[in-house]
Each structure stands twice: as structure tokens, then as C-alpha cells.
Image (cartoon, rainbow, N blue to C red):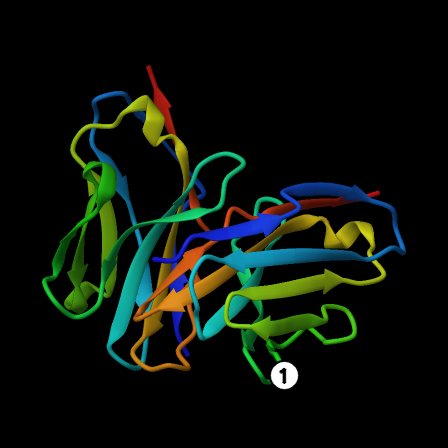
């Protein structure tokens, strides 16, 4: 599988600000995914990002809150906008190769 | 729609004891099933997967799982627990097809006592 890296690995942010998380894959992949893992919870899919098209958001997630970019086949960003403490979570980037999804190390976000 | 049920949130075993983590799924189409492990402060690592080949699947670190269609189960086992196995374990389901989505269970925390 392709190796996935994320930046930053963790951050502490103030309420009302925005944070952009970067996801880099070391080889070209078609489909990339962004997940949220709230404290003590499982993973929830935020959106699917394909290169050259608008991201597809899951129910409960909107583009204004979580804008996503996918400028090429190896890179994507997720922005968490106008943050509140409820946005404190781990955000994970993922890609699929064949029938299997692989995950990055995650970005641990704390909003004060 | 697909779903995964992982009963209980925490399992504790002694070092050297059998590890059994339960996973039941619901799917209207033939499922693909996965176990992922999340070590503290890390991302998810694939342990093993079932994608319609052999029903007994062997993964990394001595783990294995058996797909039982009649029981809609995909329980994870390891004969002898190591301290390093302490982590969060997630069962997940998807299906064939480019648009298939991965649905996770709530996860189980495994503790290993010395």
C-alpha cells in the first residue's frame, strides 16, 4: 500500500479559528477519504475526495464546515472551519487500493 | 446498508491467554470484512481482511479471524496474548465495487495483564 503522511500530527486551536490538515500519499491514488474519530468513538466518514471533482460529503457534514481540496493524485487537504470544542477529534486521511483502505497516522486536534 | 456490532467496549486478558474479540455484521450483499488495530496515539493499521476467498484469514502479529456466514460473524483471535497487543481494535465492513464505503464498529479496547 502507499505510505500516507499527515501534517500537523497534532494541534491546539482556539475557538472560531480554522485549521487545514494536509495528507500526502507517496504514490498516485484515485480515491482518498477523510474520517473523524471523536474521543472514545469509532471512525466516521466525512467525505470522499476524488481528483478533479468536488468532494462527496456524508450526511451531517457540509462543505462550508469541512472544505476539501484534491489538487492531484497524491495530495489532499481538509480544513476544519470556525472551530468549536466539539470539533476536538482525530482526523484521519485514507486511501483505497483494490478492496482495502489504508490510513494515515491521523491529526489530533484540540479546540479550546 | 451495512453495519458492524462489536459487543462490549473493553476486554482484559492475561499475558499468554487466548484473545477473542467478537464482531458481527449485517450486510445485504456479500461482505468484505476487516480488522484494524490502533495503538495509542497512532493511526489505524490493517490486521487482516476477508474478501470472499478462504474463510479463515491469517493476519499480522499472530492474529486470525474466521468468516462464518451462518452466524454473520468475523471474530478475531490470537492463541497467546502479548503485552504489545494492548490497543484498540476495530472491525469494519464494506463490499465489492468502487463506490463501496467502509463502515466501522465502535471498537474494543484490549488490555493485557502481566
Q: Quadrant of the C terminus of chain A?
A: top right
Asked whether B7 or B99 is in front, the reply is B99
> Which residue is at a point 85% across and 61% down the rendered structure image?
A82
Image coordinates of residue A52 in percent, x first then y, are: 58, 83
Which residue is denoted by mark 1 in the rendering?
Answer: A54
> Which residue is at a point 24% across and 77% down the rendered structure image?
B30
Q: Quadrant of the N terminus of chain A?
A: bottom left
> Which residue is at a point 44% across and 68% down the rendered structure image?
A28
Image coordinates of residue A31 in percent, x first then y, are: 47, 73
Residue found at the very far right of the displayed protein: A16
Chain for disc number 1: A
Asked whether B109 or A68 is in front, the reply is A68
Instruction: Check disc 1 and report its element: helix, strand or loop.
Output: loop
Residue found at the very far bottom of the displayed protein: A53
Q: Classify mark 1: residues with Cα within 10 Å, few (<14), some (14-19) or many (20+).
A: some
Image coordinates of residue B60 in percent, x first then y, are: 23, 42
Image coordinates of residue A36 in percent, x first then y, are: 60, 58
Numbered-mark total: 1
Asked whether A35 or A85 is in front, the reply is A35
The image quadrant of residue B39 is top left
A67 left or right of B109? right
A38 left or right of A101? right
> Which residue is at a point 63% across and 43% down the rendered structure image?
A9
The image quadrant of residue B55 is bottom left
Amino acid at each position: 500500500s502507499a505510505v500516507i503522511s499527515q501534517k500537523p500530527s497534532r494541534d491546539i486551536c482556539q475557538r472560531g479559528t480554522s485549521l487545514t490538515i494536509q495528507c500526502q500519499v507517496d504514490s498516485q491514488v484515485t480515491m482518498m477519504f477523510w474520517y473523524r474519530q471523536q474521543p472514545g468513538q469509532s471512525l466516521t466518514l466525512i467525505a470522499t475526495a476524488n481528483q478533479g471533482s468536488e468532494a462527496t460529503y456524508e450526511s451531517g457534514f457540509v462543505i462550508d464546515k469541512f472544505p476539501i481540496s484534491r489538487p492531484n493524485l497524491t495530495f489532499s487537504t481538509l480544513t476544519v472551519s470556525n472551530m468549536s470544542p466539539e470539533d476536538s477529534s482525530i482526523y484521519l486521511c485514507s486511501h483505497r487500493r483494490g478492496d482495502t483502505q489504508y490510513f494515515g497516522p491521523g491529526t489530533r486536534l484540540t479546540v479550546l | 446498508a451495512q453495519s458492524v456490532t462489536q459487543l462490549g467496549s473493553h476486554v482484559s486478558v492475561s499475558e499468554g491467554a487466548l484473545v477473542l474479540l467478537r464482531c458481527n455484521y449485517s450486510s445485504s450483499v456479500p461482505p468484505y470484512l476487516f480488522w484494524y488495530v490502533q495503538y495509542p496515539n497512532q493511526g489505524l493499521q490493517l490486521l487482516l481482511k476477508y474478501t470472499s476467498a478462504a474463510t479463515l484469514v491469517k493476519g499480522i502479529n499472530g492474529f486470525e479471524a474466521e468468516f462464518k456466514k451462518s452466524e454473520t460473524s468475523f471474530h478475531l483471535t490470537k492463541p497467546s496474548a502479548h503485552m504489545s497487543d494492548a490497543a484498540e481494535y476495530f472491525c469494519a465492513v464494506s463490499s465489492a465495487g468502487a463506490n463501496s464505503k467502509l463502515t466501522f464498529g465502535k471498537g474494543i479496547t484490549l488490555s493485557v495483564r502481566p
